[in-house]
Amino acid sequence: MAVDTHVLVYPGTEGELRGIVVEDFADLAGTAVEIAGERIVGPARRWAVNLDEGGLVFVDDDSIAVDPQHA
């Protein structure tokens, strides 16, 4: 999967959405930020997806799949 890929977000669920990958954060994803032992922010999501219905979501690998209509 790469930027500009048509995808399904939350595939196979009632909340399934279609969109296009606009950013792959790859090496930056999955790292929480802690300062003095206190979590400031949770891990970043890997993929930024511009939704067909409008809006932007950030998801990890387990919440995204290539859209078979565009494969």
Image (cartoon, helix red, strand yellow):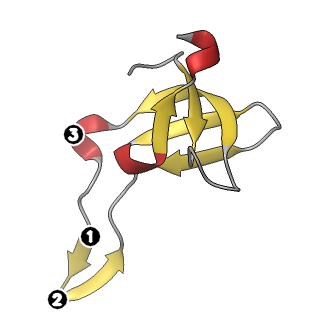
Which residue type carries mark 1? Val
Point out which mark residue 37 bears.
2
The residue sitting at 22% across, 81% down in the picture is 35
Which of the two labelled residues, at mark 3 and mark 2, occupies the earlier sequence position? 3
Calculate the distance from the C-alpha at mark 3 to the C-alpha at mark 2. Answer: 23 Å
Q: Examine the rendering and report whether any part of residue 60 can be seen.
A: no
Q: Which residue is mark 1?
A: 33
Q: Determine whether, in the image, residue 53 is placed left or right of residue 58.
A: right
- Callout 1: SS: strand
Farthest-out residue, left: 37
Q: Which residue is mark 3?
A: 27
Residue 11 location (% of width, % of height): 56, 43
Calculate the distance from the C-alpha at mark 2 to the C-alpha at mark 1. Answer: 9 Å
- Callout 3: SS: helix
Residue 64 location (% of width, % of height): 48, 40
Calculate the distance from the C-alpha at mark 3 to the C-alpha at mark 1. Answer: 14 Å
Point out which mark residue 41 bears.
none
Q: Mark 2, residues whose alpha carbon is within 10 Å: few (<14), some, or many (≥20)?
A: few
Q: Determine whether, in the image, residue 60 is placed left or right of residue 55.
A: left
- Callout 2: SS: loop
The answer to whether residue 37 is above or below residue 23 is below
Q: Examine the rendering and report whether any part of residue 14 can be seen.
A: yes
Quarter of the rendering containing residue 49: top right
Q: 17 or 49, which lies in front? A: 17
Which of the two labelled residues, at mark 3 and mark 1, occupies the earlier sequence position? 3
Q: 15 or 49, which lies in front? A: 15
Q: 12 or 36, which lies in front? A: 12
The residue sitting at 58% across, 47% down in the picture is 12
Residue 58 location (% of width, % of height): 52, 49
